[in-house]
Image (cartoon, coloured by chain):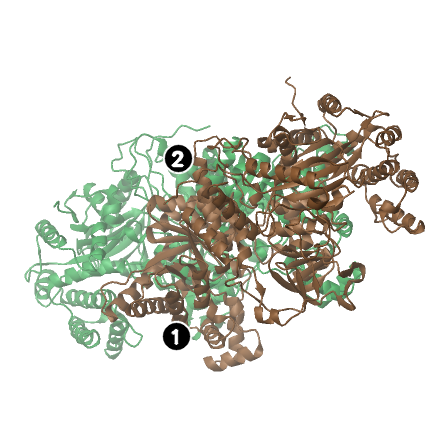
Chain colours: A brown, B green
Amino acid sequence: MKQVKYVYTFGNGKAEGDATMKNELGGKGANLAEMCRLGLPVPPGFTITTECCNDYFANDGKIPAALRPQVETALKMVEAQIGRKYGDPKNPLLVSCRSGARQSMPGMMDTVLNIGLSTSTIPGLIERTKNERFVWDSYRRLIMMYADVVMEKAEGIEPFEGKGIRAILEEMMKQYKYIRNCKADTELTADDLKALADAFKRRIKEILGVDFPDDPMAQLWGGIGAVFKSWVGKKAISYRRIEGIPETWGTAVNVQTMVFGNMDMNSATGVAFSRNPATGENKFYGEWLINAQGEDVVAGIRTPNPLNNATKSDKNRDIPSMEEQMPAVYRQLDDIRLKLEKHYHDMMDLEFTIEQGKLYMLQCRVGKRGGKAAVRMALNMLDEGLIDEKTAVLRVSPNQVMEFLLPIIEPRVLSQTKQILKGLPAGPGAACGEICFSTEEAIAATRLGKKVILVREETNPEDIDGMRVATGILTARGGMTSHAALVARGWGKSCIVGAADMAVDAPNKMMKIGDKIYREGNQLTINGSTGMVYEGALPLVAPTANQDYSLFLRFMALADKHRTMGVRANVDNSTDAKKARDFGAEGVGLFRMEHMFYGEGSARPLFLLRKMILCVTQQDREAVLKELFPYMKKDIMGTMEAMEGLPVTIRLLDPPLHEFVPHSQLGRAELAKALGIPEDEVRKRVDALQESNPMMGHRGVRLSVSYPEMTRYEAIAIFESAVELSQRGKSVIPEIMVPVVCDVRELRHTKMIIEEVHKEILRRYALKDLPYHIGTMIEIPRAALLADQMAETADFFSFGTNDLTQMTFGFSRDDIGSFMKDYLDQRILKADPFQTIDQEGVGALIKMATTAGRSVKPDLKVGICGEQGGEAASVEFCYQAGLSYVSCSPFRVPLARVAAAQAAVHRELAKTPAKAAAPAKAVAPAPVKRASAPAKAAAPAKKAAAPAKKAAAPAKKAPAKK
Amino acid sequence: MKQVKYVYTFGNGKAEGDATMKNELGGKGANLAEMCRLGLPVPPGFTITTECCNDYFANDGKIPAALRPQVETALKMVEAQIGRKYGDPKNPLLVSCRSGARQSMPGMMDTVLNIGLSTSTIPGLIERTKNERFVWDSYRRLIMMYADVVMEKAEGIEPFEGKGIRAILEEMMKQYKYIRNCKADTELTADDLKALADAFKRRIKEILGVDFPDDPMAQLWGGIGAVFKSWVGKKAISYRRIEGIPETWGTAVNVQTMVFGNMDMNSATGVAFSRNPATGENKFYGEWLINAQGEDVVAGIRTPNPLNNATKSDKNRDIPSMEEQMPAVYRQLDDIRLKLEKHYHDMMDLEFTIEQGKLYMLQCRVGKRGGKAAVRMALNMLDEGLIDEKTAVLRVSPNQVMEFLLPIIEPRVLSQTKQILKGLPAGPGAACGEICFSTEEAIAATRLGKKVILVREETNPEDIDGMRVATGILTARGGMTSHAALVARGWGKSCIVGAADMAVDAPNKMMKIGDKIYREGNQLTINGSTGMVYEGALPLVAPTANQDYSLFLRFMALADKHRTMGVRANVDNSTDAKKARDFGAEGVGLFRMEHMFYGEGSARPLFLLRKMILCVTQQDREAVLKELFPYMKKDIMGTMEAMEGLPVTIRLLDPPLHEFVPHSQLGRAELAKALGIPEDEVRKRVDALQESNPMMGHRGVRLSVSYPEMTRYEAIAIFESAVELSQRGKSVIPEIMVPVVCDVRELRHTKMIIEEVHKEILRRYALKDLPYHIGTMIEIPRAALLADQMAETADFFSFGTNDLTQMTFGFSRDDIGSFMKDYLDQRILKADPFQTIDQEGVGALIKMATTAGRSVKPDLKVGICGEQGGEAASVEFCYQAGLSYVSCSPFRVPLARVAAAQAAVHRELAKTPAKAAAPAKAVAPAPVKRASAPAKAAAPAKKAAAPAKKAAAPAKKAPAKK
């Protein structure tokens, strides 16, 4: 039997792995190896593969036997490099155990530091460091972390009286500090910390029933197992569900020599980005803390210091930067950032520690960035020759471009309003909503249709669901690299962090700013682009032409250059149509006439519709249709005019009858009068319209079959509009779309009516021709199954994926609330199919229907007008399925344009003969290994969600296509 | 250009066509040609093809130019044979124009007789026949018929003041008879009839605005066109919709020399069957009338005389038979019937006319017969060596075997009840319901869920829809070959005709029997097997072991011998299961546990279910499930025991939650008490369970995902039942079926729960094994699309075609009432897909899923448990799709067995290398041309509805299969 290689070592400028091995080593492990290979100062260590993680679970959660000897061998290599021995009482080696999946899952899995400290090794370390306080502080940290991660969570132990062991130990420490009259942890002496450590161990035994392990090897194996187990922890599962990460990926474990940023005042730790992740400017940007461990920066417990002078803000103008305090180390770090950018062709996110003046690199990865920053970086790097056009297009996730369109506070109102609070602008865009202080409340309020600002002292991974539903996030603590900031930026959500002048009292559901108290339910407006917080709900408006808009336009032009699939918009009226056109829509994929029955000005048409619904004879219906006609025509003509020169797909009426019947006594009385029948008769007819499952009831083309006169009048309105507009010199080609079709004979029936009207119009206006198209929605499974028949009669198809998803799954969209959460939680479904197209099932129907339709009519135009048409993964799928266009809400048109462009680029890159990095398995293409390998291109990624996942393409500019 | 052959002549022992040419010449034309070839006395004539009919409509309803010369040539041939000339003043030839489609459509299309009579030819005919009265009577008949069929209906003229021209002319004649004091038409003299004819012509001109044509050739072309047009008449369209006959078939037109059964007392006309169509006995059976034209017999205007002594009934014992009155002609006719049976290998339906003592054959076709008669004939003919086994199996339509299971009146009640009326037993089986006197009322009452007996003076084709919805039909006039009798037998509907002692006053919605008046809504019971009518609603029971039951058993055994696909039953309890077993079910394809919540004894389980639905915690639900458990187990065990030795498929609970929540205040109060919560809270939880589209809501396996404990308890009940039964020595293998699955992970989830329970049971009972299967319903389109994935986890599939049809069409079965009629009327759908499987759409999914499933698991068992599983065409489809079994309601099991047997025989026959008659086009295989061609077999018919459509196979016995 061949031995599985579970362990890859790195250190001293050499490494068994490299950056292409993310699938095996996780992102962290692969990049640690890569940095070693680049000669950067990385503390030596080794990575246990993701495969081993899977084997661990397959082995009933026990360490696979083959792993032990490999770990022991690797440990010996590390010991040799560092000159210390693990568990050696004299000169002990300490290590960290860190998780690391293919894709970054910040804070979702567990880490244990300072492993290897025990009663036997403590004296040796004190001897070596001459720093008794440091050693005991490290030991109490190890105990707290280990008890929490390894002894409690990994063992699946329920919190004691609702409180986790970590909270219990922290409470002990808090009490002790109070008694000893210490404000900061740093005031605790070595003796204090030793006493605490002893107390901690006793308490652990009492609560968890087992001793804190004093054997360094036991500690190590406990740490490794705990990291594996954290892969299936609640937080990690929830995050994977949101991000669509498969469980089968597993996590790697990185065991690495400990270096200490908290050893003394010549030690430090920090996080940096090779460019500013918020603005995209090419300025080295980061935060650091002297005498601290990494978690202090990331967790936002202390607000950190600026890295250099160029990126100081008003808030930290007076705090010394690393550039000022440790200029030599800073220069070394700045060199490293330039080296890494040139190597990875992308903005990098770095973690470093300085131990007694010596710099160590602990992590590097492609950095997350906000949307505007992503666009600016892509364009800058393109201009700098660092990446080519195709790569630039891939560098911005479709969701990120939406940031340019994020609402801003109405400028006039803004100029007259004073902020009540200021924090760090962590996630751009303005948002307003009711204050909520917990995830539970945020979810509950959102269910009631409210908009919510989640206000927290600081966020942690437990808040993930609340952050998701909130319109905006506001925290009192934490920096630009804190949990809240990272998550919000990833989602393009408005977020302000580190608003320190706010005192949050979550248990009492209130907060204080100055003297003023704000309670749950009070309205708040935040501007995540500036960090300003305002009282009340200020009016928000579209961004129109703000200063960054030119960046947006340049990027969109670049995307359009590479895009081949069309993008249209779903609109309800001419205002929508104009907006869609501004956003780059190339036509209307779905014009819904039903708009006239909703909202302002709808009273009369709605009354007429109700009247028509209740008519019994065709004659009566026609009389009402005549009255309704001007309203239909006005909306149709307005929309066609706004879209002049571009195609407009007009869907025939599909009003949900049961929603429109009058349920009030007054409404019935009015109708009774209008129809000249008794009220009782109205009630009877209304009752007859009730349906058990209206979604599958008398709707769409079924109405046309029963009441052909409806279709007749709609066709007249469409053709008259077309004629009158063309008489005014406007070029319009209406596309008439028939909804809810399940049999081609429905389509033929409707086409016959429309053709008759067309002939009449030609005669009436003495025209030779009046071009138009007639097509069908494919929103019923049967229509998809019989698409070849449909194509004989239809000029085009448009997939109505909302209904198609309902019927294909047998899910009523209005009713899935009762079980969809269970389905996602239990991972029965990977995603809500109403958000993103179910590629396996619904997608199979789309592909089958497109193929069958084109087998009959090779040039058949095929589009999609369901709401998924504005969702990035669905757009990519539509491109792969060969659709002619996607159509979505006007606001999402830019997103769709970028997604379509990326889909085209992905296909182009897939065609490139150059070897792509692990194209079949990799979701995030690995960075190129050698900057000098010009032909190496990014592999087509299946999911274009985060730009951080995209790899640099060669510096050579790609020739312009088309 | 090649000349299309539109006209085929026949006469004088020769014919251009033959019996295989039904598609071209229609049934009547093909068989007239065949009879000529057999040397039978057929008046010469010619047939215009169905192709010409299609060309006629393609030519905008004008006679195709190519037809005219062909008709003229054919007419010359006829003139030469008969020795008279069409339009000749001296010795004129008269002809009839009759319709004739591929498949008999009795009374649905039009006929014109006596064509060629005009002012110029009348004197010549009087001269030749020496019978002035006969000639004027023929003329007035021509005028009445022609005005109605050609001048009014074919021209699409709306009736004048609601009255058709025929009714107007009849009213005139009635008035005239009254004035002249004549009771019967026969009392009118030649002068009277001449005066009437003149008056008719004047009135026609006044009302229709055109002259009655006096030119014989104009009459002929008018007649031909009218027959074509009657193909698209309302009645014909409605009949085709019901019978599933495509419009593209068209009708042929038979132009034939007139022979007159009404020329004198030595003339007669009649209809006969080569065997008794009601009982199946091998006795020549028929009815005739002296001095009458054919329509007099068929329309039931006069109650006709018996053909021979052997078939006289109590009612017509004293009326002279043809055997007595015209013994020579009778013997000739009897020879012909034997000749025809031997030639066609089937029971034949004959029409004949005797003109002044000379016999003419006007029609022969395979005769329609009732179900019991069909079985008896098939078995008799098999015994006689006239047909082989396969043919015998095909001779009985699946629906017809149901007649053996038709309800009868409870024998003890019957013995104590006296009939109020007696008529002819035209359609077997007992029925009871409310009296309705019109089609409209029958339909309206049926919509209210009532059972209806349609009572008419006599029925005509306009009554077809009312006859369809009625449970039984009762008419005062007409014989066994009347319209009502033919239609009822075709549908297997209970029917009594010719109950002359009943006076029907339809306009006043009442009838009188003796002195007693019965009104609309009064209850009546009829016994269509005996002809007895009873007052009130007598209790009906299953037939158990009546005298014909042994015939049924023998036929079913024959069918089973040829059947290869399994037949199971859908049952709700052990009573059903026993019944199903009696009917030959080979297992249970669907056992629904929900039965315990309905009907008798359901109060407690229903209360528990309601309680469970409203529980919030899993703990509470489990507590209720424990209480519910004994009810579940009892039903499961009972059903398994009743089916001992056969497989039982148990569907996991799929209760429609929204139906079960208590809507009454009392129910809520009770639950509030039981749950220990306020009533308001109950109301809130009930509201939360309301769904917009419950059909696509929280149901089936979705409940299992949310509430796995439900599945747990169901699995315990199933396995405990299996163990306890096997401990009692009963062999049971439960098949657990998961409903409403759309993703394989739902199935895996449920399978995991079931496997856990299985392990527990094995442990608890210390068993080594307890075999069971787990499978999935395929009732959601997505499950069908991803069937390959499903098959990895499922041991079997069962298509739930009710839901699958709902989702595939987007039709809510509860709501299609509002538009299904429009869809069928406008022929957008050929049939209601909930009645018979939609083979194109739903069928495509079934085939795809079966293929995909078996590609993963070649021996995958695949069945169907939707209601279509008991419908003949659907069973045939399931066989073709390769399903392992169909499952249907117990009562329909015999039907499914026959349908499955026929499907297998069809495939066997299709494999036979011998040339089958027009296999691609013919629905009804034509009879063999030569009795001496032994290899000629019936082609596989697409629809096995009427045995009359099946052709005789060679007399050689087929070797027994298997």
Q: Chain of mark 2?
A: B
**Can residue A875 be spotted in the picture?**
yes
Say the numbered circle drawn on residue B36: none
Image x and y of residue B177, in percent: 25, 75
**Which amino acid type is shown beneath numbered disc 2?**
Arg
Q: Chain of mark 1?
A: A
Packing grade of label 2 (10 A; few <14, some 14-19, many >=20) is some
Report if the CB atoms under discs 1 and 2 are less than 8 Å apart: no
Image x and y of residue A263, in percent: 80, 38
**Same chain, marks 1 and 2?**
no
Q: Nearer the viewer, mark 1 or mark 2?
A: 1
Disc 1 on helix, strand or loop? helix
Q: Left or right? Give the position of B57 relative to A674.
A: left
Q: Quadrant of residue A49?
A: top right
Give the CA separation, mark 1 to mark 2.
61 Å
Q: Residue at x 65, y 19 (%)?
A: A3
Residue that label 1 marks: A630
In the image shown, does B90 or B669 lie closer to the viewer?
B669
Q: Quadrant of residue A881?
A: top left
Packing grade of label 1 (10 A; few <14, some 14-19, many >=20) is few
**Which amino acid type is shown beneath numbered disc 1?**
Pro
Say the numbered circle drawn on residue B907: 2
